[in-house]
Image (cartoon, rainbow, N blue to C red):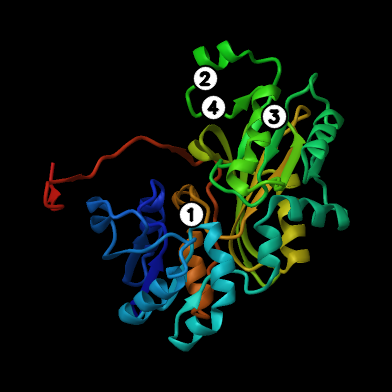
Protein backbone atom coordinates (compact mmCIF):
# COMPACT_ATOMS: atom_id res chain seq x y z
CA UNK A 1 0.00 0.00 0.00
CA UNK A 2 1.02 3.62 -0.50
CA UNK A 3 3.28 5.01 2.23
CA UNK A 4 2.04 7.98 4.28
CA UNK A 5 3.37 10.51 6.78
CA UNK A 6 1.82 10.87 10.24
CA UNK A 7 2.53 13.63 12.75
CA UNK A 8 2.42 12.55 16.40
CA UNK A 9 2.29 15.25 19.06
CA UNK A 10 3.90 14.85 22.52
CA UNK A 11 6.25 12.33 20.93
CA UNK A 12 8.72 12.74 23.80
CA UNK A 13 6.24 11.31 26.33
CA UNK A 14 6.99 8.07 28.12
CA UNK A 15 4.17 6.23 26.35
CA UNK A 16 4.87 7.51 22.80
CA UNK A 17 7.07 4.52 21.81
CA UNK A 18 4.07 2.19 22.20
CA UNK A 19 1.93 4.32 19.88
CA UNK A 20 4.78 4.62 17.37
CA UNK A 21 5.11 0.82 17.41
CA UNK A 22 1.37 0.55 16.64
CA UNK A 23 1.89 2.74 13.57
CA UNK A 24 5.07 1.05 12.38
CA UNK A 25 4.02 -2.59 12.96
CA UNK A 26 0.91 -2.43 10.78
CA UNK A 27 1.80 -5.18 8.30
CA UNK A 28 0.54 -3.20 5.29
CA UNK A 29 2.45 0.00 4.55
CA UNK A 30 5.38 2.17 5.49
CA UNK A 31 4.49 5.06 7.79
CA UNK A 32 6.89 7.93 8.33
CA UNK A 33 6.36 9.26 11.85
CA UNK A 34 7.10 12.94 12.41
CA UNK A 35 7.26 13.72 16.12
CA UNK A 36 6.82 17.07 17.88
CA UNK A 37 7.32 17.93 21.54
CA UNK A 38 7.95 21.01 23.67
CA UNK A 39 10.90 19.17 25.24
CA UNK A 40 14.07 19.27 23.15
CA UNK A 41 15.82 16.36 24.83
CA UNK A 42 18.32 14.78 22.38
CA UNK A 43 16.73 11.34 22.80
CA UNK A 44 13.52 12.65 21.18
CA UNK A 45 15.26 12.60 17.80
CA UNK A 46 15.86 8.83 17.84
CA UNK A 47 12.38 7.42 18.45
CA UNK A 48 10.74 8.98 15.37
CA UNK A 49 11.76 9.43 11.73
CA UNK A 50 11.88 13.23 12.03
CA UNK A 51 11.61 15.36 15.17
CA UNK A 52 10.71 19.02 15.71
CA UNK A 53 10.85 21.03 18.91
CA UNK A 54 7.66 23.13 19.24
CA UNK A 55 6.31 25.67 21.74
CA UNK A 56 3.77 24.84 24.44
CA UNK A 57 0.11 24.56 23.48
CA UNK A 58 -0.39 27.72 25.56
CA UNK A 59 1.82 29.68 23.16
CA UNK A 60 0.20 31.85 20.48
CA UNK A 61 2.69 30.35 18.02
CA UNK A 62 1.79 26.70 18.66
CA UNK A 63 -0.68 26.12 15.84
CA UNK A 64 1.46 28.09 13.36
CA UNK A 65 4.44 25.87 14.20
CA UNK A 66 2.40 22.68 13.73
CA UNK A 67 0.97 23.86 10.41
CA UNK A 68 4.44 24.81 9.14
CA UNK A 69 5.72 21.32 10.00
CA UNK A 70 2.73 19.63 8.36
CA UNK A 71 3.33 21.67 5.20
CA UNK A 72 7.11 21.01 5.15
CA UNK A 73 6.80 17.26 5.82
CA UNK A 74 3.68 16.81 3.67
CA UNK A 75 1.85 15.26 6.63
CA UNK A 76 -1.19 13.21 5.64
CA UNK A 77 -2.66 12.68 9.13
CA UNK A 78 -2.12 14.47 12.45
CA UNK A 79 -2.64 12.28 15.54
CA UNK A 80 -3.02 14.41 18.70
CA UNK A 81 -1.90 12.91 22.01
CA UNK A 82 -2.81 15.85 24.26
CA UNK A 83 -6.30 16.95 25.24
CA UNK A 84 -5.14 20.59 25.42
CA UNK A 85 -4.48 20.60 21.66
CA UNK A 86 -7.97 19.69 20.57
CA UNK A 87 -9.74 23.07 21.00
CA UNK A 88 -6.83 24.71 19.14
CA UNK A 89 -7.10 22.33 16.17
CA UNK A 90 -10.88 22.66 16.12
CA UNK A 91 -10.57 26.43 15.62
CA UNK A 92 -8.00 25.97 12.83
CA UNK A 93 -9.40 23.02 10.86
CA UNK A 94 -9.70 25.02 7.63
CA UNK A 95 -5.98 25.83 7.75
CA UNK A 96 -5.11 22.14 8.00
CA UNK A 97 -7.57 21.29 5.23
CA UNK A 98 -5.91 23.88 2.99
CA UNK A 99 -2.56 22.04 3.19
CA UNK A 100 -4.07 18.57 2.86
CA UNK A 101 -3.53 17.41 6.46
CA UNK A 102 -6.33 15.44 8.14
CA UNK A 103 -6.65 16.12 11.88
CA UNK A 104 -7.79 12.96 13.68
CA UNK A 105 -10.41 14.11 16.19
CA UNK A 106 -14.11 14.78 16.69
CA UNK A 107 -14.77 17.73 14.39
CA UNK A 108 -17.46 19.50 16.42
CA UNK A 109 -17.85 21.56 19.58
CA UNK A 110 -18.88 18.36 21.38
CA UNK A 111 -15.19 17.64 21.80
CA UNK A 112 -15.16 20.47 24.35
CA UNK A 113 -17.84 18.68 26.39
CA UNK A 114 -15.88 15.44 26.27
CA UNK A 115 -12.74 17.33 27.26
CA UNK A 116 -14.20 18.87 30.44
CA UNK A 117 -15.09 16.51 33.29
CA UNK A 118 -17.78 18.74 34.83
CA UNK A 119 -19.46 19.56 31.50
CA UNK A 120 -19.35 15.86 30.64
CA UNK A 121 -21.01 14.76 33.90
CA UNK A 122 -23.67 17.45 33.58
CA UNK A 123 -24.32 16.27 30.00
CA UNK A 124 -24.58 12.67 31.21
CA UNK A 125 -27.01 13.65 33.95
CA UNK A 126 -29.19 15.54 31.43
CA UNK A 127 -29.23 12.47 29.15
CA UNK A 128 -29.87 9.87 31.89
CA UNK A 129 -26.45 8.25 31.55
CA UNK A 130 -25.10 6.76 34.79
CA UNK A 131 -22.57 8.88 36.71
CA UNK A 132 -21.05 8.74 40.18
CA UNK A 133 -22.31 11.32 42.68
CA UNK A 134 -20.77 14.72 41.85
CA UNK A 135 -21.05 18.49 42.29
CA UNK A 136 -19.56 21.54 40.63
CA UNK A 137 -18.09 24.33 42.76
CA UNK A 138 -17.29 27.91 41.81
CA UNK A 139 -16.59 29.30 45.28
CA UNK A 140 -15.15 28.05 48.54
CA UNK A 141 -18.67 28.04 50.02
CA UNK A 142 -19.91 25.77 47.21
CA UNK A 143 -16.81 23.59 47.59
CA UNK A 144 -17.43 23.12 51.31
CA UNK A 145 -21.14 22.34 50.86
CA UNK A 146 -20.38 19.82 48.10
CA UNK A 147 -17.71 18.18 50.24
CA UNK A 148 -20.08 17.50 53.11
CA UNK A 149 -22.92 16.49 50.78
CA UNK A 150 -20.65 13.76 49.36
CA UNK A 151 -20.07 12.27 52.81
CA UNK A 152 -16.99 14.03 54.17
CA UNK A 153 -15.50 13.48 56.77
CA UNK A 154 -16.83 9.91 56.95
CA UNK A 155 -15.98 9.19 53.32
CA UNK A 156 -13.09 10.32 51.12
CA UNK A 157 -14.03 12.82 48.40
CA UNK A 158 -12.25 13.51 45.11
CA UNK A 159 -11.71 17.10 43.96
CA UNK A 160 -10.65 17.90 40.39
CA UNK A 161 -10.01 20.79 38.06
CA UNK A 162 -12.43 19.81 35.25
CA UNK A 163 -10.24 20.59 32.24
CA UNK A 164 -6.99 19.16 33.62
CA UNK A 165 -5.37 15.93 32.42
CA UNK A 166 -2.60 13.49 33.33
CA UNK A 167 -3.47 13.48 37.07
CA UNK A 168 -2.92 17.26 37.28
CA UNK A 169 -5.41 19.07 39.49
CA UNK A 170 -6.65 15.93 41.26
CA UNK A 171 -6.69 15.30 45.02
CA UNK A 172 -8.44 12.89 47.36
CA UNK A 173 -9.55 14.52 50.62
CA UNK A 174 -9.36 11.71 53.16
CA UNK A 175 -9.41 12.36 56.90
CA UNK A 176 -8.60 8.70 57.63
CA UNK A 177 -5.02 9.35 56.48
CA UNK A 178 -2.83 11.36 58.82
CA UNK A 179 -0.15 13.67 57.43
CA UNK A 180 2.42 11.32 58.96
CA UNK A 181 0.91 8.31 57.17
CA UNK A 182 1.08 10.19 53.87
CA UNK A 183 4.69 11.21 54.61
CA UNK A 184 5.79 7.76 55.74
CA UNK A 185 3.86 5.43 53.43
CA UNK A 186 2.90 7.34 50.28
CA UNK A 187 5.27 8.40 47.52
CA UNK A 188 5.68 12.18 46.99
CA UNK A 189 3.29 11.79 44.03
CA UNK A 190 0.42 10.79 46.35
CA UNK A 191 -2.98 12.36 45.58
CA UNK A 192 -4.13 12.24 49.21
CA UNK A 193 -4.55 15.47 51.14
CA UNK A 194 -6.29 16.65 54.31
CA UNK A 195 -9.24 19.05 54.30
CA UNK A 196 -7.18 21.77 55.99
CA UNK A 197 -4.43 21.45 53.38
CA UNK A 198 -6.96 21.57 50.53
CA UNK A 199 -8.62 24.59 52.13
CA UNK A 200 -5.26 26.34 52.28
CA UNK A 201 -4.59 25.53 48.61
CA UNK A 202 -7.95 26.90 47.47
CA UNK A 203 -7.81 30.04 49.59
CA UNK A 204 -4.34 30.64 48.13
CA UNK A 205 -5.72 30.52 44.58
CA UNK A 206 -6.09 34.28 44.38
CA UNK A 207 -2.29 34.60 44.24
CA UNK A 208 -2.30 32.65 40.97
CA UNK A 209 -5.67 33.62 39.50
CA UNK A 210 -6.09 37.16 40.79
CA UNK A 211 -8.14 38.62 43.64
CA UNK A 212 -11.76 37.52 43.64
CA UNK A 213 -11.17 34.56 41.33
CA UNK A 214 -11.86 30.96 42.31
CA UNK A 215 -11.00 27.95 40.14
CA UNK A 216 -13.86 25.91 38.69
CA UNK A 217 -13.86 22.62 40.56
CA UNK A 218 -15.62 19.29 40.38
CA UNK A 219 -16.12 17.11 43.45
CA UNK A 220 -17.17 13.48 43.19
CA UNK A 221 -17.51 10.40 45.32
CA UNK A 222 -14.35 8.39 45.91
CA UNK A 223 -14.26 5.07 44.06
CA UNK A 224 -12.05 2.52 45.85
CA UNK A 225 -11.60 -0.15 43.15
CA UNK A 226 -9.19 -0.71 40.27
CA UNK A 227 -9.14 1.60 37.30
CA UNK A 228 -10.63 0.27 34.06
CA UNK A 229 -10.38 1.76 30.57
CA UNK A 230 -12.44 1.38 27.43
CA UNK A 231 -10.61 2.21 24.20
CA UNK A 232 -12.50 2.35 20.94
CA UNK A 233 -12.66 3.62 17.39
CA UNK A 234 -15.79 5.53 16.38
CA UNK A 235 -17.22 6.87 13.16
CA UNK A 236 -19.44 9.92 13.71
CA UNK A 237 -21.38 8.48 16.64
CA UNK A 238 -21.07 4.79 15.79
CA UNK A 239 -18.65 2.43 17.56
CA UNK A 240 -16.57 0.41 15.08
CA UNK A 241 -14.21 -1.38 17.49
CA UNK A 242 -14.29 -1.52 21.29
CA UNK A 243 -12.31 -3.29 24.02
CA UNK A 244 -11.50 -2.83 27.71
CA UNK A 245 -8.62 -3.29 30.13
CA UNK A 246 -8.34 -3.46 33.89
CA UNK A 247 -5.39 -1.51 35.33
CA UNK A 248 -4.36 -2.90 38.72
CA UNK A 249 -1.32 -0.61 38.97
CA UNK A 250 -1.42 3.12 38.14
CA UNK A 251 1.28 5.74 38.69
CA UNK A 252 0.14 9.33 38.09
CA UNK A 253 -2.57 8.31 35.61
CA UNK A 254 -0.27 6.03 33.57
CA UNK A 255 -0.98 2.28 33.69
CA UNK A 256 1.99 0.23 34.88
CA UNK A 257 0.12 -3.04 34.43
CA UNK A 258 -3.01 -3.87 32.42
CA UNK A 259 -5.00 -6.92 31.37
CA UNK A 260 -7.57 -7.04 28.57
CA UNK A 261 -11.00 -7.98 29.91
CA UNK A 262 -14.61 -7.15 29.09
CA UNK A 263 -17.05 -5.14 31.18
CA UNK A 264 -20.53 -4.79 29.69
CA UNK A 265 -21.56 -1.83 31.86
CA UNK A 266 -18.49 0.18 30.87
CA UNK A 267 -18.95 -0.71 27.19
CA UNK A 268 -22.61 0.39 27.36
CA UNK A 269 -21.77 3.77 28.94
CA UNK A 270 -19.02 4.39 26.37
CA UNK A 271 -21.35 3.51 23.49
CA UNK A 272 -24.08 5.80 24.89
CA UNK A 273 -21.66 8.72 24.99
CA UNK A 274 -20.25 8.06 21.53
CA UNK A 275 -23.82 8.08 20.19
CA UNK A 276 -25.22 11.08 22.09
CA UNK A 277 -22.12 13.26 21.60
CA UNK A 278 -21.57 12.05 18.01
CA UNK A 279 -17.91 11.34 18.78
CA UNK A 280 -15.39 10.27 16.16
CA UNK A 281 -11.99 8.63 15.97
CA UNK A 282 -9.73 7.17 18.68
CA UNK A 283 -11.28 7.62 22.14
CA UNK A 284 -10.41 6.52 25.66
CA UNK A 285 -12.91 6.23 28.53
CA UNK A 286 -11.48 6.07 32.07
CA UNK A 287 -13.52 4.20 34.69
CA UNK A 288 -13.02 3.11 38.28
CA UNK A 289 -14.87 0.41 40.19
CA UNK A 290 -17.04 1.50 43.12
CA UNK A 291 -17.51 -0.35 46.42
CA UNK A 292 -20.08 -2.64 44.76
CA UNK A 293 -17.79 -3.57 41.87
CA UNK A 294 -19.63 -1.45 39.29
CA UNK A 295 -17.64 0.51 36.71
CA UNK A 296 -18.19 4.27 37.05
CA UNK A 297 -16.94 6.76 34.46
CA UNK A 298 -14.23 9.23 35.47
CA UNK A 299 -13.53 11.02 32.19
CA UNK A 300 -13.17 10.80 28.42
CA UNK A 301 -9.91 11.26 26.55
CA UNK A 302 -11.15 12.35 23.09
CA UNK A 303 -7.85 11.25 21.53
CA UNK A 304 -5.47 8.26 21.54
CA UNK A 305 -5.03 6.79 25.03
CA UNK A 306 -1.58 6.39 26.55
CA UNK A 307 -1.74 2.60 26.90
CA UNK A 308 -3.35 1.77 23.57
CA UNK A 309 -0.41 -0.53 22.70
CA UNK A 310 -1.79 -3.33 24.92
CA UNK A 311 -4.80 -3.61 22.62
CA UNK A 312 -2.52 -3.88 19.59
CA UNK A 313 -0.65 -6.70 21.33
CA UNK A 314 -4.05 -8.34 21.80
CA UNK A 315 -4.98 -8.04 18.13
CA UNK A 316 -6.71 -4.62 18.04
CA UNK A 317 -4.38 -1.96 16.59
CA UNK A 318 -6.59 1.08 17.15
CA UNK A 319 -4.16 3.79 15.93
CA UNK A 320 -3.58 2.03 12.62
CA UNK A 321 -7.25 1.18 12.18
CA UNK A 322 -7.91 4.92 12.53
CA UNK A 323 -5.38 5.55 9.74
CA UNK A 324 -7.26 3.12 7.48
CA UNK A 325 -10.59 4.68 8.42
CA UNK A 326 -9.38 8.19 7.51
CA UNK A 327 -7.99 6.89 4.20
CA UNK A 328 -11.41 5.33 3.43
CA UNK A 329 -9.93 1.83 3.25
CA UNK A 330 -11.92 -1.33 4.10
CA UNK A 331 -11.70 -2.17 7.80
CA UNK A 332 -10.93 -5.76 8.79
CA UNK A 333 -12.65 -8.08 11.23
CA UNK A 334 -10.61 -8.34 14.43
CA UNK A 335 -10.30 -11.14 16.98
CA UNK A 336 -9.41 -9.57 20.35
CA UNK A 337 -7.31 -11.82 22.59
CA UNK A 338 -8.72 -11.11 26.06
CA UNK A 339 -6.30 -11.96 28.85
CA UNK A 340 -3.42 -10.18 27.09
CA UNK A 341 -1.30 -8.43 29.73
CA UNK A 342 0.99 -5.42 29.83
CA UNK A 343 3.72 -4.74 32.38
CA UNK A 344 5.68 -1.50 32.08
CA UNK A 345 9.38 -1.38 32.87
CA UNK A 346 11.91 1.32 32.19
CA UNK A 347 14.02 1.28 29.02
CA UNK A 348 16.72 3.92 28.60
CA UNK A 349 17.96 5.90 25.60
CA UNK A 350 21.52 7.22 25.87
CA UNK A 351 22.99 10.27 24.10
CA UNK A 352 26.46 11.86 24.30
CA UNK A 353 27.31 15.48 25.08
CA UNK A 354 26.64 16.45 21.45
CA UNK A 355 23.24 14.73 21.32
CA UNK A 356 24.40 11.68 19.34
CA UNK A 357 22.84 8.30 20.06
CA UNK A 358 24.98 5.91 22.10
CA UNK A 359 24.39 2.29 21.13
CA UNK A 360 24.70 0.37 24.40
Q: Is residue 173 above or below residue 334?
A: above
The answer to whether mark 1 and mark 3 are in CB contact below 8 A is no
Distance from disc 1 to disc 3, alpha carbons, whole Å, reads 47 Å
- Disc 2 target residue: 186
Compare marks 4 and 3 and give the one earlier in the sequence.
4
- Disc 4 target residue: 190
- Disc 1 target residue: 315
Distance from disc 1 to disc 2, alpha carbons, whole Å, reads 36 Å
Quadrant in the rendering for residue 21: bottom left
- Mark 4 nearby-residue class (10 Å; few <14, some 14–19, many ≥20): some
Compare marks 1 and 3 and give the one earlier in the sequence.
3
User: Residue 167 versus residue 4: which sits nearer the camera?
Assistant: 167
One can see residue 294 in this view = no
Compare marks 3 and 2 and give the one earlier in the sequence.
2
Q: Is residue 227 above or below residue 280?
A: above
Q: Is residue 230 above or below residue 179?
A: below
- Disc 3 target residue: 199
Amino acid sequence: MESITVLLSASGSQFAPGIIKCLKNNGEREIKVVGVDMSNDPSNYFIVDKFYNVPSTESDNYVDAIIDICRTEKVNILLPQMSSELPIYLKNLSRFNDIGTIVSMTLSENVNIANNKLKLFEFMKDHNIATPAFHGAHSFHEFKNALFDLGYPYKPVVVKIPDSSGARGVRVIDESKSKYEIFAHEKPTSVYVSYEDMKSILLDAEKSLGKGNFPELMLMEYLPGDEYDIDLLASEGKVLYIAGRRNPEIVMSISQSSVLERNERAEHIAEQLVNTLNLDGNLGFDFKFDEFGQAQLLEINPRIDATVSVFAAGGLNLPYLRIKQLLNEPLPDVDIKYGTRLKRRFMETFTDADGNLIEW
